[in-house]
Image (cartoon, grey):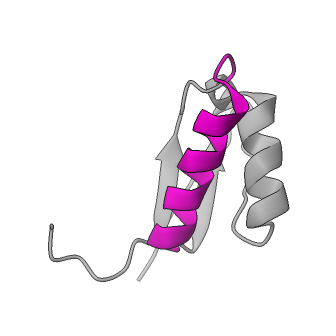
Amino acid sequence: MSGIQKVHAIVGGFHLAPAPDDIVAKTVAVFKDINPDYIIPMHCSGVNMIMAVHMAMPKTLVMPSTGTRVVFGV
């Protein structure tokens, strides 16, 4: 839709901590379709979401913590 061919990273608070498993699974399926190089979930994404990404796409998961800086270069 946007014309962008490659997504380098998906970064954000996905607010899925209270979400049912089927919503988390659908979200991870879409992430897999997008096929980013990195997924960086913030704390409000929820442990269930983080674990689902880790199980489905372990090499893409980057776990940030307080003070983490994400710098992308060319």
Camera-nearest residue between 29 and 50: 29
The residue furthest left is 2
Which region shows up in magenta? 17-35
Quarter holding the N terminus?
A: bottom left
Asked whether 72 falls inside the magenta stretch, the response is no
Horizontal placement of 40 versus 56: left or right? left
Residue drawn 76% across and 63% down?
Answer: 56
Asked if residue 16 is positioned above or below residue 70 in the image, the reply reads above
Residue drawn 15% across and 77% down?
Answer: 3
Asked if residue 19 is positioned above or below residue 42 in the image, the reply reads above
Q: Main secondary structure of the magenta part?
A: helix
Camera-nearest residue between 38 and 2: 2
Residue drawn 40% across and 71% down?
Answer: 7
Asked if residue 48 is positioned above or below residue 20 in the image, the reply reads below
Q: Quadrant location of residue 19?
A: top right
Residue drawn 41% across and 83% down?
Answer: 74
Image coords of residue 30 (percent x, y): 49, 58
